[in-house]
Image (cartoon, rainbow, N blue to C red):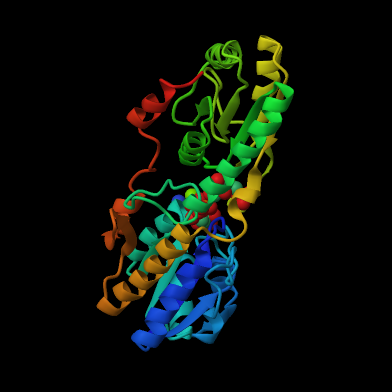
């Protein structure tokens, strides 16, 4: 069996552990030959790849980033050639199948290729944790830990100056990072894309914290919209797939809070710090298990699936189940914490 592997979408901590898990299982246990395409679909389009063997993955589990690189290049362009182009490249490299490591976008592509008869196994990764069909994606735990550390640090400086500190975290259209980091750090207000709030309500919470003699820590997800706002706050430019880049909502909210409450406020946009550096032990284990499970699926001829964490077990689920809908924060999880705001 000869297998190609690639990473697509934003990077996240744990990718190298997943690559290592798949290679150790695939090469050492099942005797596969494995290759890794560089920078996602760019590597497929340009036939840029490296051999993946035990030596290539030595000691990489604690490393952030990915030894294969990643990109948001789509295979469905004239240059990429779509399913036909990929099939031709697989024939040229004598590949029986592909292991595709990525988030909801990447697994959507995996599903499209699987529908075209290409042998694929998906491995879920993303700090956003917005992928269906799995309890958690690796990368998320590390991002939440980094955001929680930021909250802890912002709290001491905020308390010293009597300021309202507004921390913006990533997550695109899902509020998971904000919700979990906000809960872990005891934020007084947590704002998520799934549930718009009014500026009046936010200021009421911030003032009630002040009236108790404390100072607010507001966590806001980058995709949050104030009630009545037509779209998210975006930065200039687009991402590698041509989508507007999210970011900057904290810088909109902080001055509004200051103007309405008279409480000095500061905004911090955490940005890509959340995606960098060493993965937590939890993410390393989850990623390694996901990589191992991907090679198990290949060995079993279980194509068109994604590895999935369900409770304590790693199983496979049909790709269609994973990409059917975005996994967002459910109302009951939000309502539970909202009762404690202020
Ligand atoms: N519906 C689609 N049709 C064609 N190509 C797609 C589609 N969705 C995603 N892609 C391609 O897959 C790439 C990876 O998807 P995306 O950028 O959404 O990241 P992801 O896999 O969701 O990971 P993350 O959210 O963690 O960055 C896209 O940049 C794009 O090139
Ligand atoms: O790395 P880029 O292209 O700036 O993308 C940032 C986006 O990627 C993610 O980090 C992961 O999907 C999102 O949370 C964020 O909106
Ligand atoms: Mg995504």
Which residue is rendered at x = 71% and y = 32% of the image?
157
Would you identify the image quadrant in which residue 147 lies?
A: top right
Where is residue 289 drawn, in percent x and y? 37, 67
Would you identify the image quadrant in which residue 291 lies?
A: bottom left
> In the image, 325: left or right of 232?
left
- The answer to which of 125 and 322 lies nearer the viewer is 125
- The answer to which of 187 and 227 lies nearer the viewer is 187
> In the image, 21: left or right of 312?
right
From this viewpoint, is residue 278 visible? yes
From this viewpoint, is residue 87 visible? no
> In the image, 267: left or right of 85?
right
Where is residue 226 drawn, in percent x and y? 55, 21
Where is residue 224 drawn, in percent x and y? 54, 30
Which residue is rendered at x = 32% and y = 58% of the image?
308
Q: Is residue 265 above or below residue 184?
A: above
Which residue is rendered at x = 38% and y = 42% of the image?
327
């Amino acid at each position: 069996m000869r297998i190609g592997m690639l990473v697509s979408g934003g990077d996240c901590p744990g990718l190298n552990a997943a690559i290592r898990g798949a290679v150790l299982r695939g090469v050492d246990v099942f005797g596969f030959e494995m290759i890794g395409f560089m920078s996602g679909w760019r590597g497929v389009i340009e036939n840029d790849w490296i051999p993946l063997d035990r030596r290539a993955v030595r000691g990489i589990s604690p490393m952030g980033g990915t030894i294969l690189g990643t990109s948001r290049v789509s295979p469905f362009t004239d240059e990429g050639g779509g399913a036909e182009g990929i099939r031709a490249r697989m024939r040229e490299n004598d590949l029986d199948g592909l292991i595709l490591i990525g988030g909801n976008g990447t697994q959507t592509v995996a599903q499209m290729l699987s529908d075209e008869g290409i042998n694929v196994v998906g491995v879920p990764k993303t700090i956003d944790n917005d992928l269906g069909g799995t309890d958690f994606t690796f990368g998320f735990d590390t991002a939440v830990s980094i955001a929680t550390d930021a909250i802890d640090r912002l709290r001491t400086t905020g308390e010293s100056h009597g300021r309202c500190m507004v921390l913006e975290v990533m997550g695109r259209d899902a509020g998971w990072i904000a919700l979990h980091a906000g809960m872990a750090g005891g934020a007084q207000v947590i704002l998520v894309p799934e549930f718009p709030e009014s500026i009046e309500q936010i200021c009421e919470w911030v003032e009630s914290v002040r009236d108790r003699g404390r100072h607010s820590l507001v966590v806001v997800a980058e995709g949050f919209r104030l009630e009545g706002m037509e779209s998210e706050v975006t930065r200039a430019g687009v991402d590698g797939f041509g989508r507007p880049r999210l970011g900057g909502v904290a810088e909109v909210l902080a001055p509004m809070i200051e103007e309405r409450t008279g409480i000095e406020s500061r905004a911090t946009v955490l940005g890509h710090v959340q995606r960098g550096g060493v993965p937590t032990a939890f993410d390393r284990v989850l990623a390694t298990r996901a990589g191992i499970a991907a090679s198990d699926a290949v060995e079993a001829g279980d194509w068109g699936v994604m590895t999935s964490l369900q409770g304590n077990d790693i199983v496979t689920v049909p790709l269609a189940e994973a990409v059917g809908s975005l996994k967002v924060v459910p109302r009951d999880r939000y309502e539970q914490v909202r009762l404690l705001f202020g």
